[in-house]
């Protein structure tokens, strides 16, 4: 059984005859202790506080029966580890066929939850975003700079908390979907002008951070902690 916050992704699972439902990772409507195993791939790094990230791990553990295991993957701050670059960095000059992956964000994606190739609109959209934040301040001087940096795709991370641009390109639109922007061929000039850019929040994990969060819970034991292609990964056992 699968679950996701996105109804569109869950609908795709249904079309493929998989069992899936929409829910929040902080409150999964499954009976406690009823799962032999759980996986959480590229989910927890989207929660914006340490408390919420820990609560998500605790909720994952709640679902497991005693002796059950869970696998967690999160995006790593260290995209270059032991002198080796991750696939994410290596694909900076990715080929054109990667556009299939980017069409609507619903294609099968690697475990690293990679964003699409960097586009020329990144800086313009980030400037617009930041200017919008300034306008909303009503002239009041903020006590601190609360703005999140906008990441340049396929580059190393310089902050643990950031926004990653997502370019909506082309794709087939379902009847029930309402898209404010007209979808045009991704390679055209119109595409550059009309394709919207969304900013997804990420907290990228530093070495040992995910393992430490898991070890803080009394109900689980860390079986294994490792690095895999730009991700920090942990295998847990429910006690």
Image (cartoon, rainbow, N blue to C red):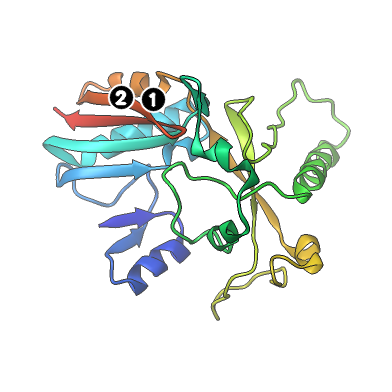
Labels 2, 1: front one: 2
Q: Which residue is depicted at the point 40% across and 69% down?
A: 11
Coordinates of residue 202 in the picture (x, y in percent): 55, 37
For label 2, the crowd category at 10 Å Cα-Cα, with few meaning under 14, some 14 to 19 and many 20 or more, is some
Q: Quadrant of the C terminus?
A: top left
Q: Which residue is depicted at the point 31% across and 29% down?
A: 234
Report which residue position mark 2 lands on: 225
Instruction: Answer whether labels 2 and 1 touch (C-beta < 8 Å).
Output: yes
Q: Is residue 19 left or right of residue 50?
A: left
Q: Which residue is depicted at the point 31% across and 48% down?
A: 28
The foreground one among 225 and 34 is: 225
- In which quarter of the view is residue 62 placed? top left
Coordinates of residue 70 in the picture (x, y in percent): 24, 37
Coordinates of residue 75 in the picture (x, y in percent): 47, 34
- SS label for mark 1: helix
The foreground one among 29 and 20 is: 20
Residue 118 versus residue 141 in the image, above or below: below
Q: Quadrant of the N terminus?
A: bottom left
For label 1, the crowd category at 10 Å Cα-Cα, with few meaning under 14, some 14 to 19 and many 20 or more, is many
Q: What is the distance, in whole Å, between disc 2 and disc 1 at their CAs?
A: 9 Å
Coordinates of residue 127 in the picture (x, y in percent): 82, 41
Residue 236 versus residue 91 in the image, above or below: above
Disc number for residue 108: none
Q: Is residue 191 left or right of residue 48?
A: right
Report which residue position mark 1 lands on: 210
- In which quarter of the view is residue 38 placed? top left
The foreground one among 237 and 27 is: 237
Marks 2 and 1, the one that precedes in the sequence:
1
């Amino acid at each position: 059984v699968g679950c996701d916050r996105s109804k569109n992704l869950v609908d795709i699972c249904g079309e493929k005859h998989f069992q899936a439902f929409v829910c929040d990772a902080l409150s999964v409507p499954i009976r406690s202790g009823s799962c032999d195993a759980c996986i959480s791939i590229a989910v927890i790094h989207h929660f914006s506080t340490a408390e919420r990230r820990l609560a998500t791990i605790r909720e994952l553990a709640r679902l497991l029966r005693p002796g059950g295991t869970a696998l967690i993957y999160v995006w790593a701050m260290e995209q270059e580890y032991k002198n080796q670059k991750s696939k994410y960095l290596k694909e900076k000059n990715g080929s054109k066929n990667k556009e299939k992956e980017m069409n609507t964000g619903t294609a099968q994606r690697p475990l690293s939850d990679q964003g699409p190739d960097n586009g020329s609109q990144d800086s313009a959209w980030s400037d617009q975003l930041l200017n919008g934040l300034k306008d909303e301040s009503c002239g009041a001087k903020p006590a601190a700079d609360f703005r999140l940096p906008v990441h340049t795709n396929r580059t190393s991370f310089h902050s643990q908390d950031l926004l990653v641009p997502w370019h909506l390109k082309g794709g087939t639109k379902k009847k029930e979907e309402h898209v404010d922007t007209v979808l045009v061929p991704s390679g055209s000039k119109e595409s550059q002008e009309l394709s919207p850019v969304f900013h997804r929040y990420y907290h990228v994990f530093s070495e040992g951070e995910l393992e430490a969060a898991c070890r803080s819970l009394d109900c689980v034991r860390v079986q294994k902690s490792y690095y895999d292609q730009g991700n920090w990964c942990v295998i847990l056992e429910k006690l």
